Image (tube, rainbow, N blue to C red):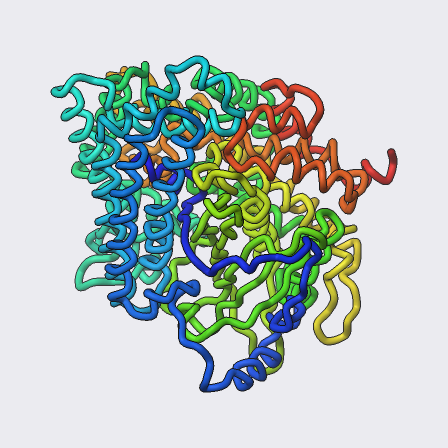
Amino acid sequence: SAMLSGCRRALRAALGWAVRGRPLGSGRRAVSTSWCPVGAAFDAKQQQQQQQRRSAADRQTGLFGVPELSCPEGFQEAQDKALQESEQLVQKACSTPPGPETVKIFDQLSDSLCRVADLADFVKIAHPDFAFREAAEEACRNIGTMVEKLNTDVELCHSLRCLLEDEIVLSSLDPCTRRVAELFMFDFEISGIHLDEEKRKKAVNLNVKILDLCDEFLAGAHLPNKIDKHVLPERIRCSFPAEGNYLQVAGLHADCPDDLVREAAYKIFLYPNAEQLSCLEELLASRNSLAQLVGYETFAHRALQGTMAKNPETVRQFLEKLSEQLSKRTQKDFEMMAKMKMKLNPKNSQLMPWDHPYYSGALRAERYNIDPGLYSPFFSLGACMEGLNSLFSQLLGISLYAEQTQRGEVWSEDVRKLAVVHETEGLLGYIYCDFFQRPDKPHQDCHFTVRGGRLKENGEYQLPVVVLMLSLPHSTRNAPTLLSPGMMENLFHEMGHAMHSMLGRTRYQHVTGTRCPTDFAEVPSILMEYFANDYRVVNQFARHYETGQPLPKTMVSRLCESKKVCAAADMQLQVFYAVLDQIYHGKHPLKKSTTEILKETQEKVYGLPYVPNTAWQLRFSHLVGYGAKYYSYLMSRAVASMVWKHCFAQNPFDRAMGERYRREMLAHGGGKEPLLMVQDMLQKSPSVEDFVDALVSDLDQDFETFIMDS
């Protein structure tokens, strides 16, 4: 929905609300007495002392420092305030003559609703207290209803159209203001506002229907399948939980060493469900009808407007060329897997889809034997946070400080609050780190914008507030929280999103931080993975938590090399998913059933045989959130790879390059065309071939030796 499409656009995103920004003096940073070094804050012992220091006289506040949210009922109050404010802003928008002021009012309107919706979006999935989750869910629904009303408000839309159709006014707008105006207009058009009454009603109904189908499809995608236990050979029955005479299959068991267990899980979990199938068909057809109703050729054309790729044709070329470049390498990977399967299972040696994830892991283990337990003592959470702090301070002049939270401000006592402070610009925003496992916590690592940054009416900047959610183990009596290499890389990835939020300091909340096109949104986070895999960076912080000894260089090299084992086949699988997503959201009616399209695409693009009576697409939950955009991750990775090679590989601590990266890529949020940002960063205009080469060259090169040699 439109006003909130900003909110919904980014990374399972959510936006936000309060913690008043401190006014900063002459621009020099004032270090607050309540700030302490970031590494220490994640060391449990230090934290306990801090908890004790907290006096009973401590002021009580609400979640994220929003006073109303000290209890679940506060959501109603916050929501009512936002709805009242939005009513006033709608009237103001309709009575203001067209000009830059119009865009400002629209952004204020979006902000007043997003501040509640986004905070509630986060609370409804993350808060341990059911009453809070329920109240947040209710607030989301009510704001959503208001948004649907606004999206079909003809008068409101008219005030924006007057602006966009007035050549003189339009030419006086700066590029960012103009882009924001166009984005708002684009949101209106999706609701069919430019159509006659009858078609507009149809568009509204389709929008509602699509939302319901999305929920239904997501729920169905995760439902386990049941099978009569007597159907399965006795020796593998114990691999699945039993319910009476039935066994429950809730996933693919992809890491199980027993081929038969994986085969059974694959065939049972992916067995087609008629309801889920008709739900998918209806979802794809409804998306297509809506897109055509509001003037697009296909849903993909609509979804790709404003992205880096711009249109389905570019995505098709990108995926086709990538597939071509990968094919020989993928064949080699599959041959290695088949050889290994032959050794372990000579009777059934044909490589099948349920083998790929298992054997690529097994080959990695055989060749490099990377034991995460050997690495994790070097990656204590405190050390990793200090590493990030040190990297940001060298590249961008930014430091992370832990700040004491007030009572009621956080939803779990192990949440830490970081202040992000620039050496001359002062406080830029806050990151709440919800890093540790707890019962019922969603497992997905993710980044939420809880409040977007924007320039306020009084000239102050509304500070961005984000949450990073991970599921790390708690510290023990004898050791701090220790991260596996994968967890460490994830921490860097999520911090890449957080810095985008902190540094995408736009005038408008609608395009702040990570609120940018999906195929650009992952660039800052994936770029951080390149830093996390570079020995020069790791060597600055990876120290054994007991002995203080640095992580040996050979261990980092072996880790990096191990990631290249079967990487071509893994990437080919992603290409297959992306192609499937494009076909499903392309020209309708589809030439064949979704399952026949799956079979054909799998054989053509992926190369492992389709298994009769399976329908993997019914478990493809990303079709909901990333419809027609599944390619985004690959394209973002290509851009991140180019930025790394051209700008940081020579010296990952180059301050001038860090500043250029901030200025050209992070600072604009979604307020500038993504391809232009990439061009300005690389100082050249990349082609589809460049994107493909960047991805493929990552598979081959031992980058480190390449630098040493050059």
Q: Quadrant of the C terminus?
A: top right
Between 274 and 634, the one nearer to me in the picture: 634
The quarter of the picture where residue 203 lies is top left
Whether 442 is drawn above or below 343: the answer is below
* Residue 36: % across, % down: 65, 71
Locate residue 90, reporting x and y percent.
28, 37
From the viewer's perspective, tell me whether residue 127 is left or right of residue 229.
Answer: right
Q: Eyeballing the image, is 425 above or below 636?
A: below
Quarter where residue 701 is shown: top right
Left or right for 125, reference 41: left
The residue positioned 56% from the left and 75% from the top of the image is: 475
The residue under the point 63% across, 51% down is: 366
Compared across the picture, whether 385 is left or right of 633 comes to right
On the rendered structure, is 52 left or right of 425?
A: left
Q: Quadrant of the N terminus?
A: top left
Whether residue 370 is visible to the viewer of this picture, yes or no, is no
Q: Looking at this rendering, what residue extends furthest in the left direction?
A: 198
